[in-house]
Structures are given as structure tokens and as C-alpha cells.
Amino acid sequence: MSTSIESVLQEHRIFNPSPEFVAQANVSGMDAYKALCAEAEADYEGYWGRLAREHIVWKQPFSTVLDETKAPFYKWFPDGKLNVSWNCLDKNVEAGLGDKTAIIFEADQGEVTKVSYRELLGRVARFANALKGLGVKKGDRVIIYLPMSIEGVVAMQACARIGATHSVVFGGFSAQSLRDRIEDAGAVLIITADEQCRGGRNIPLKPAVDEALTLSGTDSIKNVVVYQRTGGPSVMTAGRDVWWHEVVANQSDVCEPEWVEAEHPLFLLYTSGSTGKPKGVQHSTGGYLLHSILTMKWTFDLKPDDVFWCTADIGWVTGHTYITYGPLACGGTEIVFEGVPTFPNAGRFWQMIQNHKVNIFYTAPTAIRSLIKAAEGNPDVAHPKNFDLTSLRVLGSVGEPINPEAWMWYYENIGGGRCPVMDTFWQTETGGHVITPLPGVTPLVPGSCTLPFPGIMVSVVDEAGHDVEWGKGGFLVIKRPWPSMIRTIWNDPERFKHSYFPEDLGGKLYLAGDGAVRDAQTGYFTIMGRIDDVLNVSGHRMGTMEIESALVSHPLVAEAAVVGKPHDIKGEAVVAYVVLKRSRPVGEEAKQIVKELRDHVGHEIGPIAKPDEIRFGDNLPKTRSGKIMRRLLRTLAKGEEITSDVSTLENPHILDQLKEVVK
Ligand code: PRX
């Protein structure tokens, strides 16, 4: 766990919402928040049912709110029918927002394209018709492997329109990772691009798809649709690959939506757990949409004229909920950004906020920390003081704990001391925010995600599933099912049950996988980091076992253990301890093998998983029963001395070898 209880308790700064903000807020003041919580407490189904009726347009209304008969496989609004794409697009056009800008796309090199709701609907309908023309039908799984683009949003919305279940794979994952996801999902089609443009470079994307499709387990794929982003060289396989612009060319811009049951799987999103294999988190249609809408309105206080910008990639859940679905379902105007925060220089985000008059800005602590460093290193170019950021009203943070120093910098330098910072805690599995301040409600404490979203029954429990006292650490759980929760793990319902509803906690509590503590006085939550073998590297969730499996699949490697260590910018860095099948390498040979192993992990998983450090040993520290002592490896990774008794180790001398980092 990365945050200590002491540091939490030392944080005394409190920032109250201004009366002006409270007066205009969608949830206005603590009493309004408490009233919502009390309503949920008193009549849980009544509360969610009311919200689902008020915020979603249903084709067929639901009569049941929550079906718990097959718990923990909960069903929300099961007899209701709707279409997410209709709720995001047609609904807004019908409400007179046809000419309103839905998306402001800014390309890597700075070109700006604006798309209205009417145009977006037309593009989604044409692409949806093209998918149907390729034989894609309700329930089919479609892999989306696209860069940040209008097409990315269109592809996801088009799948939703025809009832196909999308599974977006982040463009930084390798061919091998893509293969694993294609096979597990049994996907019929892939949507990709020739290349992606990032940081002034064109990076090929299609070749990874081509490589994945040479691997076993991918026969289910019938077609690959290729969006021509750059026109760079692409090999098209006849009969399988088709250009996006060609398949949409003669399509009608009308496409009757497929009205699906509320429980119909809108998407699968693969994420890391504590075993080697990523799990396909399955989300629903109705409950998921409801939470995307509510959190946009309540956490971000979205107003009709706002420009909203979430900097996440559509390859992660944040990009699903707060780019593809939430902002559009609320009829908002949002930024979609292709590039990186440091190109052409590290003032890019601030420049874009100024140019587009962004009102709500949502990013990750790792980005904030690296931009603090850049601003300090190059104050004339990259410091936010050079830009007019007065359009901002609300700031958000997501993906990892935000350290109080970064919080304060964000609050003062980006928000001008005027914009509340929403430290939103949630996960791929929760679909949307579960613990978060609300900007017109919650007094803010830097480093705390504060209080539950109204209606989400969050708690901290001990090993037997009993609530712990405030001030004591424990496991973060959610006590009642909520509409946007994970429905199952695709192909693995048993794993769903035991990962998230473990029997030792009584089988009814959703176990988030994070440690947490509630402040003894205020009850505010602070997240203390994962309790399982999951790392959070630059806000990217990585399983240590996944990286270990990748290392061990290299012919030279006999054994590997991966741990995290604190990192100033990334939050956590990946440290790998490796035992080779041959003797322990030193000097140049060690350097050479480090390079080879890092490249290998890049090939097996993707560049984001490459270990920051590799250390070689003749063995790993093990107990006499053969268990690897990860606690010791974590201590060594931090460069700290081991003070505990190591006499029970099979091989204590190995620890000295493992102190040595190959530079
Ligand atoms: O450990 C928590 C951390 O990110 C994990 C979820 O990762 P992922 O499913 O990739 O989703 C990230 C975006 C929602 C959590 O289990 N995490 C996320 N947000 C926060 C956080 N840790 C502390 N504070 C947060 N605000």
C-alpha cells in the first residue's frame, strides 16, 4: 500500500466549495448530498429506479429495478430496452442540439476538426450500416484497436447502435496481447488504423493486427476495417481487410438502432488481475449508461454550455465512460485529443485549455506530476502561468492516488485556487466513479477521494468482512450491487465470483482490491493502494504475474519475480528479479540481456509493461517451503536495508546479489 496512514492524518488543509459554486451546482450543498444518500438508504431500488427513469430514454420501460436472484450475477432494469447510441446521439438531435458541437478533435500536429451532433449521428449510422454489411450482428464481439480519433468514438458508438459488444484494446498493447483478447472474446471483426500519430511521429498500428492474425486462436476474425489515418504503407489482405472510407462510401446515414435489453453486454474491457491472464470485464447497457450520465452531471457538474476534456485514451475505461459515452449522453461538447502532453512542448495541455476554453478538465496524477517537472524545468514555455486558464471551473483526477503536493499544484496553478479538484476513485469494474467529492458539496482534503457517490454503499472491512473503525485500515468493499458494476468476467464466471465476492468476506461484499482508511473524524476515504499483485504504473494497471509470465516465456529465463517500487512521476515503477537458465550475467552481458528482456516484454505485452529495472540473481529469496519472499524483494527494490530476520530463508546470501541494479 503506497500511502501511509500517518501521512493521511497529517493532512489538515480543507478547501470548502465557494458559495457561488454551491449556488449554481447540479448537486447544491451538503444537505442535497445527504438527501440523496438518505433516499438511497431508505429505498435503494426506488432511488436507482427513479434516476434511471429520469436520465435515460427507454424504448421499453423497465418494471423490475434489481434482480438479485442469481447473486452475485445481478441484473439491473432487466425488462427495460434501450440503445446507448440513440441516447447519446438521436436523443440530442431530436432535442434540437443537432448543430451543437459534440466533438472538438485536436490532432497531434494541432489541426482542429469539429463535429456536430447531427454529423456524428450520420457518421455513426453509416459506419453501423457498414458493420452490418460485413455481417456483424447483435451480440458479436468486435475488437477496436484505434488511436485517439473521432473514428474511435464512431466505431464504439456504431457497435452500440447495432448491439455488437466492443472490446477496445489500447494501441500500446502488442500483437500478442491483441491475440489473447481476440481469442478470449471470440471476436469476429477488428477495427484498426494504418498508423497513429503521437509526439510528431507516425507509428504503425496495422502491422500488429497482421501479426496477431498469424497467431493461433484468431480464426474467428472475418474482417479487418482499416481507418486511413496517415496513408502510410499498409499491406491489405484481400478478402479480409477493407478500408474504412470504402465501406462507408455508399452507406445510408440512417440506421435504426437495435433496441437491446438493459443487461445486454455493451462492452468487454480487458484488465489486469492477480493472475497471469487479463480478465474481460463485462459491462451492461442500461446500468452503465445511467452511471456515466449521473457522474457527468454530479461529479463534474456538467452544464449545457460546458466544454469538457478527459485526457484518457479510449483504450482504458476512463475513455469509455468519460469520452465515448458520458459526455455525449449528456449532450455535452468534448475535446478528443490525439497527441501527447509533451508535444510540441509540455505546455500543450494548457495551450489547449486556453484555445478551446475548456471548463472541466480531467486527467491523471502521473500527467500532473510530469507536467509540474516540465513547468519547473522550462518555465517560459511549459508553465501554466503563461496561459489563460480562467475558463476552467472543475478539475478531476483519476487512476491512482494523487499525492497532496501534486493536488496543491493542480489546484493552485491550473485551477487558480478557484476550481474544486475531484479526486475520483473508481475502477474498470465499477464503470464510473464510486468514491468522489462533488464540487458543490464536499469540503476537499488533498489526497483524499472523500465520500461515496450518492447511492454507492462503500465501506472498509477487516479480513472477516466486518466494518473496521474509522481511522483503521482495511479492505475497500462495496456492500450492495450498483447499476454500473461489472456483470461477469467474460468466459469465466467462477473467476468473477471468487475475485470480487470472496467467500471469506461472506460472499456478498464486492472486494475492490484496494486498501483504504476512513479519517477518524470526517469519515473521508483515502485509498492506500492495491492489496493484490497489481501495479499502477503511470495510471496503467499491470499485473505482476503477467509481466513474470512474459519474462519466463523468454528462452533464457528460468524464473522471475516482479514487484513495484515508488516512482516520483509514474507512481510505481516495475522492478524485475530474474534468474537465468545459465549463470548470473554481469557487466556487458548483463546489459545486453536486460535490453533483450525488456524488448521481449514489450513484444509479449506492450511497451507500457517493460520493466524499469532488472536485477539478476542465481536464485530468488525463498522460504524453506519454496515460497518467494516478495516482501523482501519490495524492500530491496526501494533500496532499503532489510532489517527483519532472514534466517528462515533457504538462501539468505542471494539478497546481496539482488541489490545490484543493471544500469
Ligand atoms: O488502485 C486503484 C487505482 O486504480 C485502480 C483501478 O485501475 P483501472 O481499473 O485501470 O481504472 C483506472 C481508472 C478508473 C484502483 O483499484 N485508482 C483509480 N483511481 C484512484 C485510484 N487510487 C487512488 N485514488 C484514485 N482516485
Image (cartoon, rainbow, N blue to C red):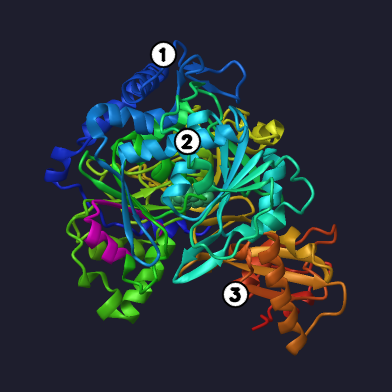
Please identify, in this view, whether the residue under mark 2 or under mark 1 is nearer the observer.
Answer: 2
Which residue is outermost to the front? 250
Which residue appears at 68% of the width and 46% of the height?
Answer: 240
Which residue is outermost to the bottom? 587
Q: In the picture, which quadrant includes the C terminus?
A: bottom right
Please identify, in this view, whether the residue under mark 3 or under mark 2 is nearer the observer.
Answer: 2
Q: Look at label 3 and name its amino acid.
A: Glu
Write down the quadrant of residue 502 in the picture. Answer: top right
Please identify, in this view, whether the residue under mark 1 or under mark 3 is nearer the observer.
Answer: 1
Question: For this rendering, which residue is in front, 61 or 527?
Answer: 61
Question: For this rendering, which residue is in front, 467 or 302?
Answer: 302
Q: Earlier in the sequence, mark 1 or mark 3?
A: 1
As drawn, the label of residue 251 is 2
Identify residue for label 1.
Answer: 61
Identify residue for label 3.
Answer: 640
Question: For this rendering, which residue is in front, 227 or 308?
Answer: 227
Question: For this rendering, which residue is in front, 357 or 72?
Answer: 357
Q: Secondary structure at mark 1?
A: loop
